[in-house]
Amino acid sequence: MLEVSNINLAYEDIILSDISFQLSQGDCLGIVGKSGAGKSSLLNIIAGLLNPNSGSICLNDTKLPVPATMLIYGYPQIQLVKQDFSLESYMTVYENMNLNSFHISSKKREKEIYRILKILGLFSLVHRKVEYLSGGEKQRLAIARAIIMQAEVLLLDEPFSNLDEKLKSTLINYIIDLKNKTNISIIIVSHDGTDLLSICDKIVHLKNSKFGKQKKPKEFYYHPRSIQEALLFGHWNVLRLPDKKLCFRPNQFSLTINGDNCIDVDFKHSVFKGFYTENFFSTSYGEIILYGLKELSEVKKIKIEK
């Protein structure tokens, strides 16, 4: 179990204030927050690469040393994939993987390296030097290097930011599979909460240097504490009726107009998104977006499902 206790960090301004949480073996925690919220600083503290002003990190009931007391910064049991990749630029993809895989027997090492590179779409680049890789390829290689270390805790800092949708989906599925098969604990930080919904057991919002309440993905998506928190996970409709305020996701509606929360809508236009269509409407109480399998130009009234 990873225990983060009362972490504080400040320079001229407060970056992190009294951050505490526990992460059980095999669980995945998502940390969402806007750029500059302190997400990367927190990961660097957990990885033993940055000294907090106060607080402690414990792993399996053992308190880890403060980085300032260590000859070499970093905890071997906790691997961080940084946004700057931390790769050896003049080595090949295979050589970068090999540097992190000496704990694997020589007979199994090459097979394991190739297996992970195939999953992350890098097998065809195995002999290419890192300096000739694209930004997205470098990020995927950095993730592959962390995965092959077989650490107890894996920290991923914005791991999906340079991946296209297909590779993002592949990586998400591998992380889920990795968590299930190895029981590794994972912390993922992102400014886009939608990337965390399918992976994480719990999600927490880092805002104004503090943690909010940890919640399950569905609870976070459908029951955010604020509009700002809601928008981290996609569009959020807000209608201010005379007697109440209705807030809902674009899929939280029906065309069965019986009972409460029924409103008249005026279709404006639609945007085809492939497997769904965004439909833009105006109402007497504000503009809204509704998701559907097709254009909803004939719709005149909806019921908001909460």
Image: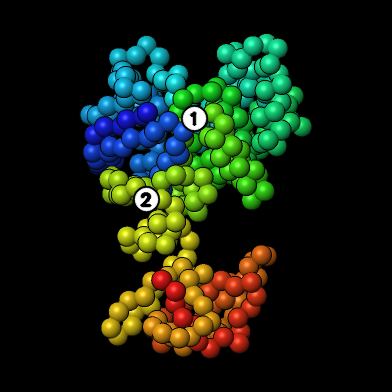
Disc 2 element? loop
Residue shown at 56% from the left, 40% from the top: 176
Residue 77 lies left or right of residue 160; in this view the side is left
Q: Quadrant of residue 136?
A: top right
Toward the viewer: 62 or 146? 62
From the top left corner, tell me how far across and down residue 276 is, in percent.
63, 68
Badge 2: residue crowd in 10 Å (few <14, some 14–19, many ≥20): some
Label 1 packing within 10 angstroms: few (<14), some (14-19), many (20+): many
Extreme-right residue of the structure: 124
The reply to whether the C-beta atoms of the residues labelled 2 and 1 are less than 8 Å apart is no
- Residue 226 appears anywhere in the view: yes
Q: Which residue is mark 1?
A: 184
Disc nearer the start of the sequence (2/1): 1
Locate the N terminus and report the quarter of the image it occupies.
top left
- SS of the residue at dot 1? loop
Residue located at (51% from left, 83% from top): 256
Instruction: Report x, y in % for residue 191.
Output: 45, 49
- Does 161 sit above or below residue 81? below
CA distance for labels 2 and 1:
20 Å
Q: Amino acid at mark 2?
A: Lys
Viewer-proximal residue among 125 and 297: 297
45 left or right, relative to 200: left
Residue 277 picture location, percent across and down? 62, 71
Q: Residue drawn at (50%, 54%), measured in percent from left and top?
A: 194
- Point 62% across, 47% down: residue: 169
Give the labeled residue for mark 2.
Answer: 215
Is residue 265 shown to the viewer in this render? Answer: no
Label annotation for residue 281: none
Residue 159 place in picture, x, y as percent? 53, 40
